[in-house]
Image (spheres, grey):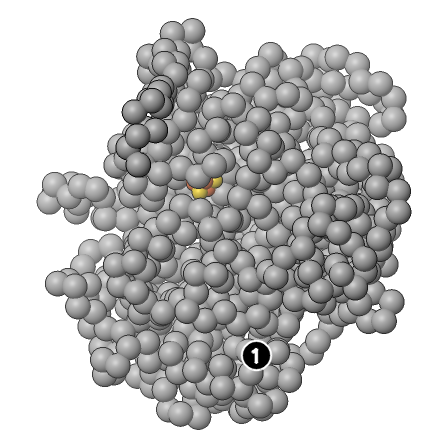
């Protein structure tokens, strides 16, 4: 009725007095949205908006992005370096020189007394790529510890490992545009609407245009599952069994792409022999998906539309070829995406290989709409994979290859013999080595293991054993700083200059919007000052400017899979990001034709025989399944499933301090089935105690049909909560923890007032 409306006041948008907008890429998830921050006349950031001509987000931002300007002034920021002799003593303010000298001296003391690898360095997926590259040069080229890793081991190492095993190299082969070409999408353990909202928007827009089949495999009825044509509520940890059974059906019914397999893969006979054991009837008993559904999904994926056999029209223009996508007609294509539901498992790497196997046997790699695309976690998890040297040497070079060691040593002007000949420990193994007394010192950079690693009680004990710990973080109040002897205040996100790479290999720019507060400094400045202390003869070059470092990286990338030699900071910002590979040769070609935007590499492996193994072929790898997870039993009868909420980012270090994000989702809660809640006498809104073999935690009960009766879902963001319970068994290939498969029991709490008080504690930072 128009009646009432007449009386309503129109919505007024507050005039924030914005005089300038500055460009950046969002610093939360890996979607990589282009964002502009509005500054008022005093230069204060007061607003955020999406960039309309950016291909990734086309003007949109999610709940986190639209409040990102509040990050600069959030509580708890570190303003000056701090020192103390013992970790439980009060902090003393210190100068940068004294703090950096202390870090240098302790690294060398521990290495002299206990060996070079007794000092560990753990970084993050949050910094900018030039910072990762500089830290890698410092660590591999000057400090010389082999126990160097990033917190990306907690989210992406299974994807990295699986890509390497299947394709011979890391690097997601697809892009968001694939949603616009696909005929079938299987999402494995990925809840896009909450985890990657703008990728979801891209997917949904494409689906509304073409109504392709959407199949979601997830133990929980997620928001994405609610939108799916088919939801497969799989038994936790058994995805590999479902994948094997799907391949069983595909081979048995002759639905595989024989031409593609012959031209592009090795190992099909061994794979067929293994999956022959996984008939749908047997598989259904393990993975909980009925045999008919397995057959329907396998057939739908292998033949996503009744349009005849796949056509292998592969052309090769300069800089990478694409199968035909002209004129709106294309060959039938099916794609798969996945996130932590696959990666965070004892079978994480195998799950990724299984997804790749399915893609390879159906010819769904490197063509529009046909891909296996890992949806990455942190904003620059890709940047650290490409350039940090954590897993080896820059740009996917490996320590195990003598030629790679020689190339990088010559480029950096260091002795190749200084490099280890194989990779050291990953992050999850480093904490076990601390517990065992093998690692004595640690430099933690923009990561908070006391919040993010499984089995918090054990991590605390390991941290207490350190002789020395340095925490470098933009927040002084991170839980892990409790154990530090040196605190270095760092800049965050767009207080710095550089680039990040998103899920679809798009390198995008962050310009410095405002300086770090107080005496805090950009991470790059800190690494360069540390490097000066190890690089006395100035033998190794450490450029000061991010733009110069990027050009150096470009020179080191020539001819590699992730070739960025055709990019520079200005071109990247101008085009709102460019996908790699983008070589200097391609850039010159584009320039000669007046191409805009530059033709970055939309897809990898677009021509036959272009995989990264020596013979150009991918590997089909058999995946025998042994169930080695913790599973519910009589004493701990409930599955604990953990995951994310749209309002928060990881340990809430940032979003817990940003008004609206935290207001929307302020307390830890569990999703619990109404049947289980009734059986335990638990009312909606009551606090419950969760108990595992590791510890206990308290959360508010929210009965919902989203979870089955033998499972609860607990968001992992809250302080001292989910990881008090998780076991985190490690994947044998990737060393990534199985966060999503633990067994607990639920207890009703009589004293609700005390429980509410405890819950308040978990909200703190
Ligand atoms: Fe930032 Fe991700 Fe949200 Fe985009 S979808 S605004 S990258 S958090």
Q: Residue at x 60, y 32 (%)?
A: 662
Q: Residue at x 41, y 34 (%)?
A: 25
- Decide if residue 355 is on the left or right side of residue 507: right
Looking at the picture, how far across and down is residue 588, in whole percent? 19, 43
Up the image or down, 159 lies above or below 466; here it is: below
| Foreground pick, 752 / 746 | 752
- How many marks can you see? 1
Q: Residue at x 17, y 47 (%)?
A: 589
Looking at the picture, how far across and down is residue 358, in whole percent? 44, 76
Q: Quadrant of residue 367?
A: bottom left
Q: Quadrant of ligand 1?
A: top left
Q: Quadrant of residue 238?
A: bottom right
Mark 1 nearby-residue class (10 Å; few <14, some 14–19, many ≥20): many
- Decide if residue 489 is on the left or right side of residue 1: right
| Foreground pick, 380 / 107 | 380
Q: Which residue is mark 1?
A: 289
Whether residue 621 is visible? no
Up the image or down, 88 lies above or below 207; here it is: above
Looking at the picture, how far across and down is residue 282, in whole percent? 61, 89
| Foreground pick, 239 / 432 | 239
Up the image or down, 422 lies above or below 39; here it is: below
- Decide if residue 327 is on the left or right side of residue 452: left
Q: Residue at x 56, y 18 (%)?
A: 73
């Amino acid at each position: 009725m128009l009646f009432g409306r007449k009386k309503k006041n129109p919505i007024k948008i507050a005039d924030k007095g914005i005089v300038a907008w500055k460009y950046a890429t969002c610093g939360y998830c890996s979607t990589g949205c282009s964002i502009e921050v509005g500054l008022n006349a005093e230069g204060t950031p007061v607003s955020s908006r999406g960039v309309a001509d950016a291909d990734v987000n086309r003007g949109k931002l999610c709940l986190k992005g639209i409040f990102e300007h509040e990050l600069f002034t959030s509580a708890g920021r570190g303003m000056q370096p701090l020192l103390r002799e013992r970790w439980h003593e009060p902090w003393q303010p210190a100068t940068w020189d004294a703090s950096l000298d202390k870090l240098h001296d302790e690294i060398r003391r521990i290495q002299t007394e206990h060996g070079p690898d007794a000092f560990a360095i753990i970084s993050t997926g949050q910094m900018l790529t030039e910072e990762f590259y500089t830290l890698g040069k410092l660590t591999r080229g000057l400090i010389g510890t082999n126990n160097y890793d990033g917190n990306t081991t907690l989210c992406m190492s299974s994807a990295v490992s699986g890509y390497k095993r299947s394709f011979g190299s890391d690097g997601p082969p697809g892009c968001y545009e694939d949603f616009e070409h696909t005929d079938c999408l299987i999402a494995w353990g990925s809840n896009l609407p909450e985890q990657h909202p703008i990728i979801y928007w891209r997917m949904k827009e494409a689906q509304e245009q073409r109504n392709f089949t959407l199949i979601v495999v997830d133990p929980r009825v997620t928001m994405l599952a609610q939108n799916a044509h088919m939801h497969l509520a799989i038994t936790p940890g058994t995805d590999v069994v479902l994948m094997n059974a799907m391949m069983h059906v595909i081979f048995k019914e002759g639905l595989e792409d024989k031409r593609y397999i012959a031209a592009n893969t090795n190992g099909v006979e061994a794979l067929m022999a293994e999956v022959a054991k996984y008939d749908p009837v047997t598989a259904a008993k393990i993975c909980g998906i009925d045999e008919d559904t397995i057959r329907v999904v396998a057939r739908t994926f292998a033949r996503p539309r009744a349009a005849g056999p796949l056509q292998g029209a592969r052309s090769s223009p300069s800089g990478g070829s694409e199968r035909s996508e002209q004129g709106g007609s294309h060959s039938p294509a099916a794609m798969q995406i996945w996130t932590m539901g696959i990666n965070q498992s004892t079978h994480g790497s195998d799950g990724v290989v299984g997804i790749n196997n399915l893609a390879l046997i159906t010819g769904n790699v490197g063509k529009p709409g046909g891909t296996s695309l890992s949806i990455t976690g942190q904003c620059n998890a890709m940047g650290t994979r490409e350039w940090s040297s954590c897993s080896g040497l820059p740009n996917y070079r490996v320590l195990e290859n003598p030629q790679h060691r020689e190339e990088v040593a010559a480029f950096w002007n260091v002795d190749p013999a200084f490099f280890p000949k194989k990779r050291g420990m990953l992050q999850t193994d480093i904490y076990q080595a601390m517990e065992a007394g093998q690692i004595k010192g640690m430099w933690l950079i923009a990561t908070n293991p006391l919040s993010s690693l499984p089995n918090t009680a054990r991590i605390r004990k390991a941290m207490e054993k350190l002789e020395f710990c340095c925490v470098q973080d933009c927040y002084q109040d991170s839980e892990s700083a409790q154990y530090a002897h040196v605190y270095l205040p760092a800049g965050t996100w767009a207080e710095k200059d550089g680039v990040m790479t998103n899920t679809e290999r798009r390198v995008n720019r962050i310009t410095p919007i405002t300086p770090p507060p107080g005496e805090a400094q950009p991470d790059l400045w800190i690494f360069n000052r540390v490097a000066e202390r190890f690089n006395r003869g100035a033998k190794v070059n450490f450029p000061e400017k991010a733009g110069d470092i990027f050009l150096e990286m470009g020179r080191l990338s020539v001819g590699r899979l992730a070739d960025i030699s055709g990019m520079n900071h200005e071109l990247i910002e101008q085009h709102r990001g460019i996908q790699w590979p983008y070589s200097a040769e391609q850039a010159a070609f584009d320039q000669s034709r007046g191409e805009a935007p530059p033709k970055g590499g939309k897809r990898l492996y677009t021509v036959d025989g272009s995989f990264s193994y020596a013979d150009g072929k991918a590997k089909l790898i058999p995946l025998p399944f042994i169930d080695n997870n913790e599973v519910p039993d009589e004493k701990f009868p409930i599955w604990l499933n953990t995951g994310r909420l749209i309002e928060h980012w990881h340990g809430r270090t940032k979003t817990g301090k940003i008004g609206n994000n935290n207001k929307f989702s302020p307390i830890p809660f569990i999703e619990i089935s109404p049947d289980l809640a009734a059986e335990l006498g638990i009312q909606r809104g009551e606090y419950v105690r969760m108990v595992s073999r590791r510890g206990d935690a308290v959360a508010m009960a929210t009965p919902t049909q989203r979870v089955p009766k033998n499972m609860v879902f607990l968001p992992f963001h809250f302080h001292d909560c989910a990881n008090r319970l998780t076991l985190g068994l490690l994947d044998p290939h990737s060393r990534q923890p199985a966060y999503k498969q633990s067994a607990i029991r639920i207890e009703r709490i009589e004293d609700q007032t005390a429980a509410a008080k405890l819950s308040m504690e978990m909200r703190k930072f």
